[in-house]
Image (cartoon, grey):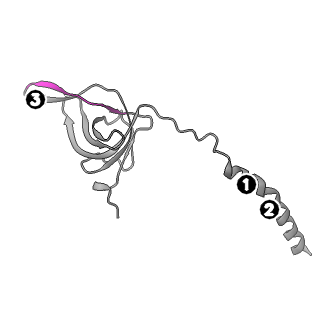
């Protein structure tokens, strides 16, 4: 008798929950709005130039979003970088950037500017692939 009563309770609970579960699955998610600041970019890093005067890195990227090259600054401590925290040639990178100052490199006794498209920002920042060329184990 106890088993029959438990089966009836489970059936009633299951039937009463079915419409709400179905409604939740078909309605658009609420509170999951993704916002970001800056301009999105993404692609393979072709070259990394050390900005010797400004203490950051200029990443030359084959940007898939604009279908052209981008020069994006990565500044440790200012730019937000996610796993795998590797900024290097032949790695994939995806993120957002904001306008910035140029990369300054030391030539002789002077610091000369290299123009940039922007700097990786904190909203949301950028993430990189684990191994060069997107390979994984």
Spot occupied by residue 106 in the image (x, y as percentages of width and height): 13, 29
Secondary structure state at the residue bearing disc 1: helix
Residues at discs 2 and 3 in contact (Cβ within 8 Å): no
Residue hosting label 2? 14
Residue shown at 51% from the left, 35% from the top: 35
User: Can you tell which of label 2 and label 3 is closer to the viewer?
Assistant: 2
> Relative to 82, is 69 on the left or the right?
left
Residue shown at 47% from the left, 34% from the top: 36
Spot occupied by residue 30 in the image (x, y as percentages of width and height): 64, 41
Residue 103 lies in what quarter of the image?
top left
Marks 1 and 3, how far apart in space?
65 Å
- Magenta segment, prevailing SS (helix, strand or loop): strand
Residue hosting label 3? 107
Find the residue positioned furthest to the left: 108
Specify the label residue 21 is tagged with: 1
Q: Counting residues from the N terminus, which is met first, the one under dot 1 or under dot 3? A: 1
Spot occupied by residue 11 in the image (x, y as percentages of width and height): 83, 66
Spot occupied by residue 7 in the image (x, y as percentages of width and height): 85, 70
> Relative to 120, is 1 on the left or the right?
right
> Relative to 123, is 31 on the left or the right?
right
Secondary structure state at the residue bearing disc 2: helix
Q: Residues within 10 Å of mark 3 (few under 14, many from 20)?
A: few
Q: Residues within 10 Å of mark 1 (few under 14, many from 20)?
A: few
Q: Counting residues from the N terminus, which is met first, the one under dot 2 or under dot 3? A: 2
Between residue 1 and residue 24, name the one nearer to us.
Answer: 24
Find the residue positioned furthest to the right: 1
Marks 2 and 1, how far apart in space?
10 Å
Q: Which residues are magenta?
A: 109-120
Residue shown at 73% from the left, 54% from the top: 21
Marks 2 and 3, how far apart in space?
73 Å
> Relative to 67, is 12 on the left or the right?
right
């Amino acid at each position: 008798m106890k088993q029959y009563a438990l089966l009836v309770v489970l059936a009633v609970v299951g039937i009463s929950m079915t419409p709400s579960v179905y409604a939740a699955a078909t309605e658009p998610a609420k509170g999951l709005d993704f916002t970001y600041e800056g301009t999105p970019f993404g692609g393979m890093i072709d070259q990394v130039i050390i900005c010797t005067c400004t203490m950051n890195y200029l990443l030359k990227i084959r940007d898939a979003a604009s279908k052209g090259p981008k020069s994006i600054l990565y500044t440790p401590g200012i730019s937000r970088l996610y796993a795998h925290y590797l900024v290097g040639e032949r790695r994939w990178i995806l993120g957002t950037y904001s306008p910035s100052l140029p990369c300054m490199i030391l030539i002789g006794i002077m610091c000369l500017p290299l123009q940039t498209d922007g700097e990786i920002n904190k909203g949301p920042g950028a993430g990189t692939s684990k191994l060069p060329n997107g390979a994984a184990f």
